[in-house]
Image (spheres, rainbow, N blue to C red):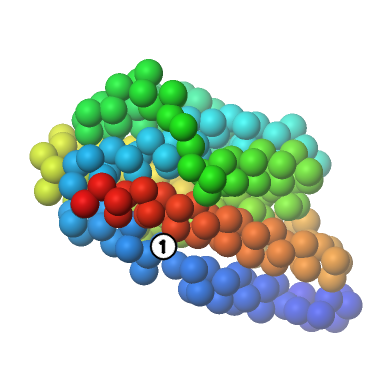
């Protein structure tokens, strides 16, 4: 608890507010993710999703990298180093395969070549997400971690694993081909699970708390905009 330190909210109340923000824009209820979890999308539709969503995993070094550089706390800097290391090498959760490589292999399983994946003409929502994360992660560690871990990554657990299972069950992928999402079921849970600890270490003032809440809200809204834009393209391929 943080009673008596002059803050307007307990850290537990901040987490509850973040949970409310997520509940209002839950990917579990978005038609795009429902289709990915339940196998109602065609293979061309999944391929289009993968190309557009690639703006996140293929360029993750632009997001997590600045968080490591900007982190003012040595112990938390180690955590950020582990995140960058895992994304770039896969040696903690992915059997030594970098996460971008897992994603490229997933794309190939749906007929998207590496050249096509990197050559994607991104929709406005995907561009907005990339620009948002590049900017917020460079701006400050407080904002960047809140947006990326407590905002963007917090909704992956409970969804990513189901997407992986669906890709195996309904599209004939091997567990290795679908492992990008099975890996992120675990990795993103780890990245986003330290909310209270993060607040205690870095949110020392009411302004800090406001910034955390705003950063998470901005991240959730930006991701929702991306899903909406991608869904328009995917739905048009019926």
Residue 10 figure quarter? bottom right
Residue located at (59% from left, 46% from top): 128
Residue farthest top in this picture: 115
Residue 71 figure quarter? top right
Residue located at (43% from left, 36% from top): 54
Apparent side of residue 160 relative to residue 145 in the rendered image (left or right): left
Q: In front: 218, or 82? A: 218
The quadrant of the picture occupied by the N terminus is bottom right
Dot 1 falls on a residue whose secondary structure is helix
Apparent side of residue 231 relative to residue 78 in the rendered image (left or right): left
Mark yes or no: residue 151 visible. Answer: no
How many marks overall?
Answer: 1
Residue located at (63% from left, 64% from top): 217
Q: Where in the figure is residue 91, as x and y percent of width and height?
A: 43, 27
Q: In front: 2, or 46? A: 46
Q: Where in the figure is residue 113, as x and y percent of width and height?
A: 30, 22
How packed mark 1 is, by other alpha carbons closer than 10 Å (few <14, some 14-19, many 20 or more), is some
Mark yes or no: residue 238 visible. Answer: yes
Q: Where in the figure is residue 156, as x and y percent of width and height?
A: 42, 54
Q: In front: 45, or 108? A: 45
Residue beneath disc 1:
27
Is residue 81 shown above or below 168? above
Apparent side of residue 125 relative to residue 120 in the rendered image (left or right): right
Q: In front: 46, or 88? A: 46
Residue located at (77% from left, 67% from top): 209
Residue farthest right in this picture: 6
Q: Where in the figure is residue 231, as x and y percent of width and height?
A: 37, 54
């Amino acid at each position: 608890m943080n009673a008596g330190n002059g803050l307007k909210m307990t850290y537990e109340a901040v987490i509850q507010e973040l949970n409310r923000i997520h509940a209002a824009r839950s990917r579990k209820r978005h038609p795009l993710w429902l289709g990915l979890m339940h196998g109602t999308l065609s293979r061309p539709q999944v391929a289009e999703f993968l190309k557009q969503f690639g703006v996140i995993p293929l360029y993750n070094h632009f997001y997590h990298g600045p968080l490591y550089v900007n982190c003012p706390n040595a112990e938390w800097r180690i955590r950020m180093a582990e995140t960058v290391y895992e994304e770039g090498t896969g040696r903690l959760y992915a059997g030594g395969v970098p996460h971008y490589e897992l994603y490229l292999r997933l794309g190939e399983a749906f007929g998207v070549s590496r050249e096509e994946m990197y050559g994607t003409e991104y929709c406005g929502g995907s561009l907005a997400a990339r620009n948002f994360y590049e900017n917020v992660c460079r701006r400050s560690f407080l904002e960047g971690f809140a947006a990326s871990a407590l905002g963007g990554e917090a909704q992956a657990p409970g969804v990513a694993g189901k997407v992986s299972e669906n890709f195996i069950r309904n599209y004939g992928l091997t567990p290795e081909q679908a492992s990008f999402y099975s890996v992120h079921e675990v990795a993103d849970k780890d990245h986003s699970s330290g909310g209270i600890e993060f607040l205690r270490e870095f949110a020392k003032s009411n302004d800090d708390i406001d910034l955390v809440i705003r950063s998470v809200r901005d991240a959730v809204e930006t991701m929702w905009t991306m899903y909406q834009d991608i869904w328009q393209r995917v739905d048009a391929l019926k």
